[in-house]
Amino acid sequence: MKNANTMKGGRVVESASAALDAGSRRMPLLAAFVTMAIAEWRTLVAQVARAVAGQRTNRAALESELFRGQYRLSSNSDDDLPVP
């Protein structure tokens, strides 16, 4: 499930893509460059999302192997707590 920030970013990119389609007749080179940058950004975001999901999967497998499913590792640091 996507969080609110990811969904906002998707809407921004979609709006930018629509604006580029309208402006591509006047500035084709700039529009092509920005379109390529948006495509690369989407690729990067997808790669980061896959990496984070893989890390979660690996951590769950490690916890299961170490503690045979009885315990979960947790941090005492406030840094990884969700922001309210």
Image (tube, rainbow, N blue to C red):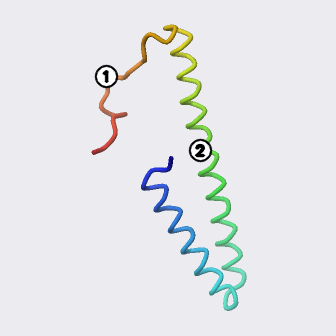
Q: Residue at the left extreme?
A: 84
Q: Earlier in the sequence, mark 2 or mark 1?
A: 2
Q: Residue at x 53, y 14 (%)?
A: 64
Q: Residue at the bottom extreme?
A: 26
Element at label 1: loop
Position of residue 23 relative to residue 50, above or below, is: below
Q: Residue at x 67, y 87 (%)?
A: 27
Q: Which residue is more in the foreground, 21 or 7?
A: 7
Q: How many marks?
A: 2
Measured Cα–Cα span from mark 2 to mark 1:
25 Å
**Callouts 2 and 1 close, C-beta under 8 Å:** no
Q: Position of residue 4 (x, y in %)?
A: 42, 55
Q: Position of residue 3 (x, y in %)?
A: 45, 50
Q: Position of residue 19 (x, y in %)?
A: 58, 81
Disc 1 residue type? Answer: Asn
> Which quadrant would residue 39 be assigned to in this image?
bottom right
Q: Which residue is more in the foreground, 27 or 64?
A: 64
Q: Residue at x 67, y 59 (%)?
A: 40
- Residue highlighted by disc 1: 76
Q: Residue at x 62, y 41 (%)?
A: 50
Q: Position of residue 18 (x, y in %)?
A: 60, 78
Disc 2 residue type? Answer: Val
Q: Is residue 47 left or right of residue 69?
A: right
Position of residue 64 relative to residue 44, above or below, is: above
Element at label 2: helix
Q: Residues within 10 Å of mark 2 (few under 14, many from 20)?
A: few
- Residue highlighted by disc 2: 48
